[in-house]
Image: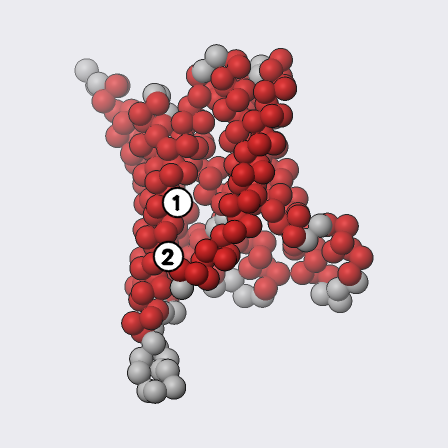
Amino acid sequence: MVNVVAQRPARQGVMIGVAATALGVLAFAADAVDGITAQVVVTALVSSGLAWGLAAFLAGLSATGRRGAVVGATALLVAATLVYYLLILLVGRGWSGGFLVDGSSVSWYGLRSVAVMTTAWLLVSMVAGPVLGLLGQMTRTARVPIAALAAGAACGLLSGQGWQQVAVAPPWRLWLIGNPNADYVLGILAVELVGVILPLAVLAWSATRRRLWQAWPTLLFAMASTATLSALFWHVLPTAVIWLH
């Protein structure tokens, strides 16, 4: 007789591995897309905080228990990060080649940059993974007030990057600039809309599925507060990246 309970963790592990590989490969492929407009749009779809965070949230949502949600979501982000940077190291090799003014190779500095960024994103994965995985699991299984809090918090975290982009480049201002590159402006607008609307759609789906609308004040409070914190994180991230380099 087949042990169904024993099969579930194995099946979840396979799904996590496949999803992690897909995220890493797609993120690597997005870096090679030609054209700045196309690259902006593709990166937002497959290599953004929303794309990877949503994958971690869904991993937690589909897990059978809290431990599985935390471990699965964390493993997903960690494995995807390793796949991405291994591809950069072994396939892309953008870190190698070239020389400094004194004639020395820049490969060492390239390797150092890859190592630093890998470490940084692994640390982010080990923080974001448990949080998003647990929020996903709580959204599906917790009592309505707690589930509403979890769903709202997840939406806020996932939409933070989108709100930060809207704050930096408001859609109405983009239209008034009169940029001759209309395709680029439309690409930025599409990215901003996806970054905000998709998390809200996930929230609406979760709230309808669990009948969480009766706790709408909790939903809105959790979403607003975590969206603010998430947007601040994405705002300071470029400065942190420059400092690390």
In the figure, 20 relative to 1: above or below? below
Residue at point 34%, 87% (across, down):
102
Residue at point 52%, 29% (across, down):
153
The figure's colour scheme reads: secondary structure
Residue at point 38%, 69% (across, down):
94
Q: Position of residue 43 (x, y in %)?
A: 52, 54
The reply, left or right, for residue 236 in relation to residue 81 is right
Secondary structure under tag 2 reads: helix
Can residue 77 be seen here? The reply is no
- Nearer-the-camera pick, 196 or 242: 242
Displayed quadrant of residue 74: top left
Q: Amino acid at mark 1?
A: Val
Q: Which residue is mark 2?
A: 117
Q: Earlier in the sequence, mark 1 or mark 2?
A: 2
View extreme (left): residue: 1
On residue 93, which mark appears? Answer: none
Number of callouts: 2
Residue at point 45%, 27% (across, down):
135
In the figure, 140 relative to 47: above or below? above
The answer for how far apart the CA atoms under marks 1 and 2 are is: 10 Å
Q: Position of residue 137 (x, y in %)?
A: 42, 23
The reply, left or right, for residue 159 in relation to residue 245 is right
Q: Position of residue 142 (x, y in %)?
A: 45, 15
View extreme (bottom): residue: 102
- Nearer-the-camera pick, 112 or 10: 112
Which quadrant: the C terminus? bottom left
Q: Position of residue 158 (x, y in %)?
A: 53, 38
Badge 1: residue crowd in 10 Å (few <14, some 14–19, many ≥20): some
In the figure, 240 relative to 106: above or below? above
Q: Which residue is mark 1?
A: 124
In the figure, 147 relative to 52: above or below? above
Q: Amino acid at mark 2?
A: Met
